Structure formats: structure tokens, C-alpha cells
Amino acid sequence: MFNIRRADVNDAPAIARVTVDTWKTAYRGVIADEYLKQLNYQEREKGWRQFPFQDSWVYVAENDEERIIGFAAGGLHREAGSVYQGEVYAMYIDEAYQHQGIGTLLLRAVVRKMLAAGLNSLIIWVLSDNPYRRFYERHGGIPLESKLLTMDGFENEITAYGWLDARIIK
């Protein structure tokens, strides 16, 4: 059994761990090994401690031992003037817990909050070579466009998935 709950800044260390561990397993062979090797919990935790939890929706999934095993974060779309009002910023599940419906539960939790806030459409950007991108297609996401993402020594193509009516996810 899994518990889905709203996260706060105190969850930053666990969210950082899930982020780093998931990148190192899910993106092996997709992202350069040199980049993956340099990922560390401390740097990711710093970033999550600065994340605006109060202005967005972050949900975590916990296992029976109350250990955080996944999370999803979303909020207002970061690009002004888009037809997409909301954005899922990140969603990661520990490798040992994937394919158990946790991603769907987390996505639905974020989308319910978006809908309640009047955000009826959403977008998510994923690595174009992400082996799990079919997850978004199974949930009704439509591939929109691709572009090159460059950040912190990382360069890769990303693809946007969009939902003009996010109610199909809830």
C-alpha cells in the first residue's frame, strides 16, 4: 500500500534522493555517463529547498515504512501566453516501485489541485529519449513540440506533452 500526501520543504532530502537515483537508473544510456556520475544528493537538496512549495503543488508517495519513493511537482505554466495553464515540472518514482500505479496516483493528485485552482490545461516537458514517455501518452497527453534543453552542462532534446482538457487525467 502507498500513501500519497502533500509535500513541503522538509521533504527536500528525500525528494532529492529520488531525483538523483531515478536519473541514474532511468536515463542510463540516454544521458552521458559523466553527467549522471556527478549528480549528488546535496546539490539536488539545495535546489529543492529553494523550490517554491507554497506556490505550487508537490506530492510524494510513501511506502509502508513511510519512506518517500516518488514525487510529482506542478504549478503554473512557466511560459506566459501559452494555451496551457498548468505545468507538471517533475515526476519521478524509485526504480523498485515503478509500474505499480504510483505515477498515475501522483499525476492525478497534482492535476486535481490544478483543476481546483482553475487550471484546466497542462503541459509537461520530458526527455525525448525518455523510456517512460509513453506513460504520458497512455494518460491522454499529445506530443506537441521538441526543442533542445541546455542547462548545467547538460544538453538533450525534450518533448512537450499537452492536455487541453486536464479533466481526462483525474
Image (cartoon, rainbow, N blue to C red):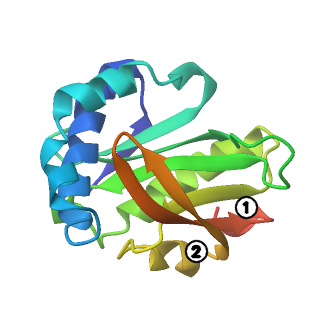
Quadrant in the rendering for residue 76: top right
Q: On the picture, is 131 further left or further right than 26?
A: right
The picture places residue 12, in percent across and down from the top left corner, at 31, 26
Compare residues 115 and 130 and report the one nearer the observer: 130
Q: On the picture, is 111 further left or further right than 11?
A: right
Instruction: Please say whether residue 39 is visible from this viewpoint.
Output: yes
Compare residues 128 and 142 and report the one nearer the observer: 128
* Residue type (three-letter) at the residue carrying disc 1: Ala
Q: On the picture, is 41 further left or further right than 108?
A: left
The picture places residue 145, in percent across and down from the top left corner, at 67, 70
The picture places residue 118, in percent across and down from the top left corner, at 82, 42
Specify few, some or many for label 1: CA neighbours under 10 Å numbering under 14, 14-19, or 20 or more.
many
Secondary element under disc 2, as helix, strand or loop, is: loop
CA–CA distance in space, label 2 to label 1: 10 Å
Q: Residue at x 57, y 20 (%)?
A: 54
Q: Residue at x 46, y 53 (%)?
A: 106
Q: Which mark is residue 166?
A: 1
- CB under 8 Å between discs 2 and 1: no
Q: Residue at x 64, y 76 (%)?
A: 143
Placement of 152 over or under 167, stated as above or below: above
Q: Quadrant of the C terminus?
A: bottom right
Instruction: Please say whether residue 68 is visible from this viewpoint.
Output: no
The picture places residue 132, in percent across and down from the top left corner, at 38, 73
Q: Residue at x 78, y 54 (%)?
A: 84
Secondary element under disc 1, as helix, strand or loop, is: helix
Q: Which residue is mark 2?
A: 139
Compare residues 35 and 99 and report the one nearer the observer: 35
**First reached walking from the N terminus: tag 2 or tag 1:** 2
Specify few, some or many for label 2: CA neighbours under 10 Å numbering under 14, 14-19, or 20 or more.
some
* Residue type (three-letter) at the residue carrying disc 2: His
